[in-house]
Each structure stands twice: as C-alpha cells, then as structure tokens.
Amino acid sequence: MLNLNNLTIKRGNNVVFSDFNTSFKTSNLTVVIGKNGSGKTTLLRTIAGFIPIENGHMSFKKVDMTINKNLWVEKLIYIDTKNGLSQDLTVLENLATWVQMKGWSTSRDNLIKALRSVEMEKYSNVYISQCSEGLKKRAALARLYFSFIFGVEFWLLDEPSNDLDKKSIILFKELVTNFLKINGTIILTTHDTNLFKSKYEVLDLDLLKEKIII
C-alpha cells in the first residue's frame, strides 16, 4: 500500500488539502476523478515529489518516502499534461535525454523499441516542434517502456489519453495491461470514464473532501 497520512498541501498561499488521508493499492490501477480545481494534478505532483508536503507524510511498505525521496523517485515515472518535451530536440533526442536524467544507461536499440511500443519509430528524427499534440503525447508515453527494463514500480499519469486517437489509446492500454501483469501500480487522472473497461479503483476527490468537511 501507498499511504498518505494527514497531508497538508499548498499551492502558493492556497491550501488544497488539509489533514488528507488516503491509500492506494499496489499492483493495481487507481483512477483519480473530481471536478476541475479539486486537486487531481496537485495530488499527483505531490506524490511524484514535485510539490512539498507542508505536513504529514507518505509511506510505502512502511518506509517514509517524504524522507527517502531519492529512493522514491527511482521507483516511479511521472508524465503530466505538458509532457515535458523540448521543442528544440527530436523525438529520439527527447527520449534519450529523459533516460539520462533518470540516471539510466541504455542502448539506441532500446530507445527505438520504446518508440516502437507507441508506434513512434518513424518519427524518431522529427523535431517536437513539428509534431501534433497527439504525437507529442505518444512521444512522452514512450518513456513507460523503460519500466520493463529498469524495474519501475509506479506510474503517475495526468490525463494520459488527452490528444490520443483511437489507435494510440489501444497502444496505451496495452502498456497498462503489461505493466499490471508485472505487478506495477498505476495512479492516473482522466475525464474519460469509459477509458478502461477492466476492474480498477476510483478515488473521487469531491466525495473525499465532502467527508472531511462533514
């Protein structure tokens, strides 16, 4: 279990979560839902370590990840709605740069295999500035392939199906299915309630906040 205990989280001067408690089943898919402004992205960015926790702590297997931040970052891949791509690099160069930033060493062959997993191989030498929004999303999702090489345990994905066409969504779902088969844990946000047909957990931030207020 990934446990969030008594969290207080701020964005600027605004308190987004106060005394917030929840847990996520591991080796499982959890879909986080809620109205715009409910804190879905803030929650993911906090779990990923990009937003500091004002109070409380996050633990995994009884280890406090708010203290062991480097250990936690090694376990996850986080992809947000902006995709984190450089406009001045090609699709392949972006992927290679991201792998290096993660501290991993890999071959060109593995980079191509990653692009192939989302059918982006033929765009490898195309600059991101020349890509459509759908291609940019697929270029970002190619990072997920490295979970199967480097033992990543968590995916944190903010609206991963945005800008994807039907074929690309099928490819993304294949990656999800394969990751769950190796006991990966996925926490994602989406407005598409029909994205997954298989069983998954739902965290409704609107309902959870109502309970806290009551």
Image: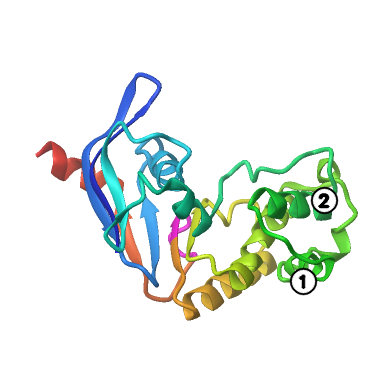
Above or below residue 77? Residue 81 is above
Q: Residue at x 39, y 72 (%)?
A: 27
- Locate residue 62 relative to residue 109 in the image: left or right: left
The part of the chain drawn in magenta is 187-195
Q: Answer above or below: position of 61 versus 157.
A: below
Disc 2 residue type (three-letter): Glu
Nearest to the observer: residue 42 or residue 213: 42
Q: Please name the colour scheme applied to the rendered image.
A: rainbow
Residue type marked 1: Lys
Which residue position is annotated with label 1? 113
- Looking at the image, can residue 82 be seen? yes
State the image quarter where residue 161 is shown: bottom right
- Distance of label 2 from label 1 (alpha carbons): 14 Å
Q: Residues within 10 Å of mark 2 (few under 14, many from 20)?
A: some
User: 39 or 25: which is nearer to us?
Assistant: 25
Q: Is residue 126 magenta?
A: no
Quadrant of the rendering where the C terminus is positioned: top left
Crowding near the residue tagged with mark 1, few <14, some 14–19, many ≥20 C-alpha atoms within 10 Å: some
Queried whether the magenta region covers residue 193, the answer comes back as yes
Does residue 189 appear anywhere in the picture?
Answer: no
- Assign a secondary structure to mark 2: helix
* Direction from residue 111 to residue 191 in the image, left or right: left
Ranked by sequence position, the earlier of labels 2 and 1 is 2
Give the residue displayed 70% in from the left and 58% down from the top: 138
Q: Mark 1 falls on what kind of element?
A: helix
Residue topped by disc 2: 93
Q: Is residue 8 left or right of residue 47?
A: left
